Image (cartoon, rainbow, N blue to C red):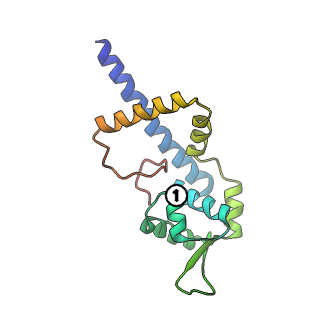
Amino acid sequence: MQEQNICNNVLVELRKIIRAIDLHSKKLMQACGLTGPQMILLKEIIKAERMPISSLAKNVNLSHATVTSILDRLAKKQYILRVRDSDDKRKIYVQASDEAKQLISQSPTLLQESFVNQFMKLSDWEQTLLLSSLQRIATMMKATNIDASPVLINHDIE
């Protein structure tokens, strides 16, 4: 009976994590009209000022196709500009518009940013313990072959 209670408690905690991610995604949409992945890309672009799409995709651990799709949505909202390289016309860079910079400066913190800040304060053994436990849970849920990036959302990226 004790084992069943522990198992139920683990499932409840997993559900809390999923729910926290979902609620935070909704909060972002309400606060600034952007999804988590859109905010992540904009923050990365703003940090670099201007960057090639391939570098952006690599920096945020998303596929080039996914990043291009998100950038298309940001371009429709006029939050990014695509600029061709003056020397090599095949190269396209992205940069954030002034409106996007202002929006991001006033937007709430991403859930993963607060998580990373707290996680980094843990000792090495605690970080390793958490990673090991989560890896075991992923294995038990047959989720080890699922391609995932460190973007905390609980629905398709776009």
Tag 1, which secondary structure? helix
Q: How many marks?
A: 1
- Quarter of the picture containing the N terminus is top left
Q: Position of residue 126 (x, y in %)?
A: 52, 28
Q: Where is residue 145 in the image (x, y as percent from the top left)?
A: 30, 48
Q: Which residue is rendered at x = 69% and y = 63% of the image?
A: 101
- Quarter of the picture containing the C terminus is bottom left
Q: Name the residue under label 1.
A: 60
Q: Which residue is rendered at x = 40% and y = 51% of the image?
A: 148
118 versus 2 height, above or below: below
Which quadrant holds residue 117? Answer: top right
Which quadrant holds residue 138? Answer: top left
Q: Which residue is rendered at x = 43% and y = 47% of the image?
A: 154
Q: Is residue 119 left or right of residue 69?
A: right
Q: In this view, does 103 lie to the left or right of 53?
A: right
Kind of residue sitting beneath label 1:
Val
Along the line of sight, the residue nearer the viewer: 66 or 60: 60
Q: Which residue is rendered at x = 48% and y = 49% of the image?
A: 150
Along the line of sight, the residue nearer the viewer: 30 or 3: 3
Which quadrant holds residue 2? Answer: top left
Q: Position of residue 87 (x, y in %)?
A: 62, 87
Q: Position of residue 11 (x, y in %)?
A: 36, 29
Q: In this view, does 129 lie to the left or right of 47?
A: left
118 versus 37 height, above or below: above
